[in-house]
Amino acid sequence: MKTADYLNQLLRKYSGTFDIYQPYVIHGKEYPAYGYFFSHIEKYVLVREANMWSCDSYEHILFIETDTVTQTLLDEAHAIIKDYMEPVLVRKGKELPEEGHMYSYLTISLISNHTLSKEMQKAVRRFKYEKGYKFNLRGFSQAHIVCATMEDERVYTNYAGRKAAKLYRDIFADVKNGIPGFKPLSD
């Protein structure tokens, strides 16, 4: 199975709820795709002007294709989250996220040709980044990492990203069944 075919199916699944941007450039380096999700929920009494509360939820996903997952790649993923995704995408260059921010999930999706070594499996499981704002009163940001390997058709995640594992496992079946992949609206 090719990483490009897998990525194409993955983008098809995510495109139902996420805005997909292809390619995506961060600090001069090009990545295959980026996905953005936003949800606004509010509770009000009778009319919208009598708003009791509201909250905003976000998810940012950066897709990376690679031959093998190395410690250097995981360090790069951590740097992208810490130096770009959190300050630029979550806080938008300000000290705090916008009012009403509840959470932002910062997901790195690694699609690898080769299986992970035991050391890299452990490193993916231990991958962690969390940041709270004003003692979590302004919400928090949390890193998820999901790695799909084409060689053995397995999915590895950190603890925070474990809920995405089923989706990523299901993509292997979609590719094998020849389901048509992602097509941008501009085509």
Image (cartoon, helix red, strand yellow):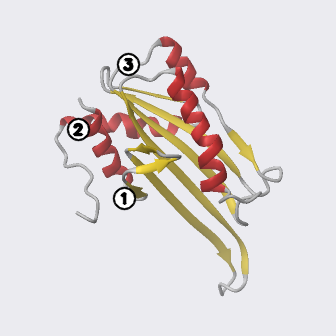
Mark 2 falls on what kind of element?
Answer: helix
Q: Which mark is residue 16?
A: 1
Depth check, mark 1 against mark 3: the one in front is 3
Residue 167 vs 18, above or below: the answer is: above
Amino acid type, residue under disc 1 in the picture: Gly
Spatial CA distance of label 1 from label 3 is 29 Å
Residue 19 vs 27, above or below: the answer is: below
Number of residues whose C-alpha sits closer than 10 Å to that of mark 2, classed few (under 14), some (14–19) or many (20 or more) = some
Tell me which corner region of the image, top left, top right, bottom left or bottom right, holds residue 53: bottom right
Disc 2 target residue: 175
Mark 3 falls on what kind of element?
Answer: loop
Residue 130 vs 186, above or below: the answer is: above
Given residues 178 and 81, the one toward you in this image is 81
Measuring from the top left, give residue 64's x and y in whole percent: 42, 38
Q: Residue at x 25, y 56 (%)?
A: 183
Number of residues whose C-alpha sits closer than 10 Å to that of mark 3, classed few (under 14), some (14–19) or many (20 or more) = many
Tell me which corner region of the image, top left, top right, bottom left or bottom right, holds residue 170: top left
Q: Which of marks 1 and 3 is nearer the N terminus?
A: 1
